[in-house]
Structures are given as C-alpha cells and as structure tokens.
Image: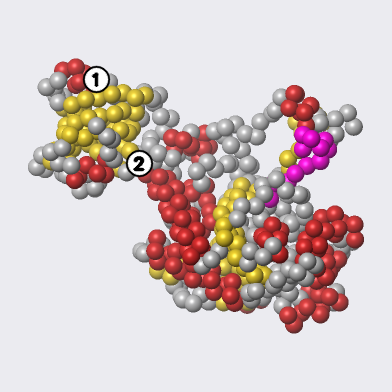
Amino acid sequence: MERILTAQTSQKKGEMVKVCGWVEARRDHGKLIFIDLKDRSGVLQCVFTPGDAELHKLGDTLRSSWVVEINGQIASRPVGMVNAEIPTGEVELQVSELKILNESQTPPFALDTNGLEIGEDLRMKYRYLDLRRNRLQKNIRTRHQIIQFIRNWLAEKDFVEIETPILTKSTPEGARDYVVPSRLQHGKFYALPQAPQQYKQLLMVAGFEKYFQIARCFRDEDTRGDRQPEFTQLDLEMSFVKREDVMALNERLLIDLTEKIFPQKKIQEIPFPRISYQEVMEKYGTDRPDLRTDKNDPNLLAFGWVIDFPFFEKTRGSSSSNSESSDPSPSSGSSTWTFTHNPFSRPRDEHMDWLMNKEKIGEILTTQYDVVLNGFEIGGGSIRNHQAKPLKKVFEIMGFDEKRITDNFGHMLAALASGAPPHGGIAWGLDRLISILMGEPNIREVFSFPKTGDGRDLMMNAPSEISKEQLDELGLEVKYANNEFTRILRKKNS
C-alpha cells in the first residue's frame, strides 16, 4: 500500500490507507488508545481498540516523537467528537497494523507550543526538534514560498540567476571579513563575501545586464542586536538604468509578493512615499522610520524609500546591516572621510564635479536608496560608478594611497575601464523582510539553524578547535597569550 499524507485522509472515508509520521500526543482512555500522528501536512487522530489484544498492547507502548507507520481504515468520528480546529477533524484512522520505525528519547521541551516560552539557548541546541513545532514549520515553508515567488517573478522579467564565489578576496567594504586560510599558499587567505557587490558589478561588465541571486553573506561583527554572522540577501543588478528604474522594479516586486503570499496584509501607501535623508532625520531622528499611521495594526505594512544620502561622513565605528549597505569602518589613511553606505555608489550628477575635484566632500549626495518597512531597513542599493576615475577618487578621498587602491580594487578599476555600462542595483535583507511579514520578534525565528548573538552554533558546537595535523597542513599555529585562548594566524615557523 502506498503512503498518503494525513491531510489527504478526509477524502478517504471507508478506505484502507497507510500513513507515516511522528507521535505528537498519546491519550489512553482505558479500552481505547488515541494517537495524534503528525506529518508534514498536518495531524490525524488514530484509534487503537481492544479487539486485537497484541496490536492494542503495542499501541500502548507508543510515546511522544516515536516514528511510526500505521495502516487502517478511515472512518467518520463519532457524533460530538469532531475537532473543528484541524482539517482532519471529522475523521479518524482505525488502526489495523502498526510498525514502529524508530523510538525517541523524551524531548527536552514541549513541541506543541510556539516555543517562545523556552530559553533560546536550549532551543538552538536542539534545533532539529524545535523546528518540528507548527510555527517554525510555517515560517520555513513560507520562506520557501517567498524565495520561489521572487525567483519566478524576476525570471519572467529576463533576469538571470547567477551564483558568485564564496571564497574571495578580503577588501575593506564596511565590516570585518571571515577569513579562510589557504592550504596550498601558506600565509595567504581567502575571505567569505560580505555581499556579492563587486561580482555583480563585474557581471554587468560581462554583459548579462540583468542579474539576481539569493546570496549568502558573511560579516564578522561584534555582538549587537538582531544579527547573524551569515544571512541571506536578494541581490540584483541591472544595466542601462537610472535610479527610478531600479526603485520602480523593486517596489512592484514587493507589492506583488505581498498581495500574492500575504493577502491579509494591507500596504499603507502605494506608490511608496519617498523621503530625503535630511528630511527623515529632522522629522524622525532615524533613517529607518516607522511610517505606520496605526502601529497597533499587525497587518499594516508601511513601506517607504529614503533617498539623497550624503556620500561621505567623518570616520566612526564599524557596523553593517543585512542589505548591501553597510556603515563603514575608518580608513587607515590620513583622511577623516569614509563612505556612508557603499564606496561603489555614484554621486548625483550635479555633484560629480565636486567628487572629481575633491571639494565640498561633506555636501556630496549619492544615488543611494534604502527601502524601509515598519521601522526597519529591509534593503538598500544605488546607481554605481561605472567609470574607473570617479571610483578611484572615492578611495583617494578616503585616504587610500595608490598602492592600497591597486591592491584592494585594481581589478575593479580595470573592469570599469573595459567598457562597463551604466548600472545599478539593490540588495534586500531577506531574513529581516520575512520576519516582519511573519510577525516574528527577530530574524532567528525564520532561520533554519541560527547562531547565538556571539556567533556560536550550540547544536554543532562551533566554532571549535581543529587538530594539530590540520593546523600543520595550513601552516598555522595556535598561540596562548595572557592565559587567554587567542588565535594568531601566521606562517608556520615564522
């Protein structure tokens, strides 16, 4: 007999079926034993009667989270026993055969609640169990729907999904890099990408014109707020476009996505309102304003655009967001200027002369645009400097000398000097967007396997030490200093 899902059993009254899943609950009513069987589609009540003593005895051994295969006949529930709270509430399975596929230890916490009452560290340690709860199943499945919708929507508009490298070069882009030592080139390191920023611009030089990617990004940041060391972006770039083109496309995508997957949600204002950086700071004191007219309405979505950001600011501490935008780290040069969002942005046309002459630096406005939602930045992008000379001026203003510019960004300057088209793009922080749409308190609730605020994976016990043999292969040593365990990466025997 072929297995069916529990959700299909309502249409199988009177038929013999096979179902498989986990025991979610067991209720012993004396002669009758009731089992709630859960699979990916829902829950089905299964009944063991005393008519078959051996089967009844076996059913009596079942416990929570055991994995079973059950055969039996689907019947209507007795009058007064219908459960209107579940789709299979009018039927039950009368068990004729039970096979125990795997037993389970007692779960460390209840799985039939939303889980928010349980300590987060414990939930992360047993995440494979935590993910069984209905709320997280819904979050992860809705995340899939959102990503699938985005992929199909962009593909219909002639965008090409292109994967870019995970092992890349360390360059100063705003946050600390995660670095990966090279086994074959001792003393040299790859970096994990903070974002696909440079690669997507290089794809425009390559002539693809419309690119997107559901991209994994990595930033080694200090513990602060609702962050993850790795996160997911919708990353896209377009050639031969102006700011209005990119903003219009993204606005339409956000509207269509909301209407299709979250029809119960109401978008407060269409088209999205646009506010300059100066105005938003004066009015709200933040560049991530909550524009909702009724903040008590959980289904109200107040999207908005923030535009006309300053290109440069005085150097300050480093941090970054889950979009392609990032607050910069101070440059190591003599200048006190650094970029506010992205060094690859293009200034507004009327400010290009100021950039090229390195004058009125604090007054230069960039083509950066951020999209905000209910008090959070969910995406950011810009029109890029598609010519080498203006980009080089950006790094000069930041105090980079000729050698550093060449070492860090020589490949970009060479590419832009090879017939780069005008182009621009954006990146969304997908985790943040999904958590807002799902009404979750933080992005960890929409991750499959999140890490703690200080970057630890409590389930896999990572980061962890590696063997001396692995260290030797990589040409690395571990150094203990001041009785504290610190890693200093250097050439072996240097």
Q: Could you tell me which residue is drawn at 51 percent across and 37 percent down?
A: 124
Q: Is residue 18 visible?
A: yes
Q: Amino acid at mark 2?
A: Arg
Q: Residue furthest top?
A: 54
Q: Main secondary structure of the magenta part?
A: loop
Residue 58, which numbered label? 1
Figure quadrant of the N terminus: top left
* Placement of 141 over or under 402, stated as above or below: above
Q: Position of residue 380 (x, y in %)?
A: 62, 65
Tell me the crowding category of disc 2: few under 14, some 14 to 19, or many 20 or more residues within 10 angstroms, Cα based: some
In what element is the residue under mark 2? loop
Q: Is residue 152 left or right of residue 387?
A: left
Residue range in magenta is 182-193
Residue 37's place in the image compared with 301, above or below, is above
The residue at the point 60 percent across, 44 percent down is 453
Q: Is residue 478 visible?
A: no
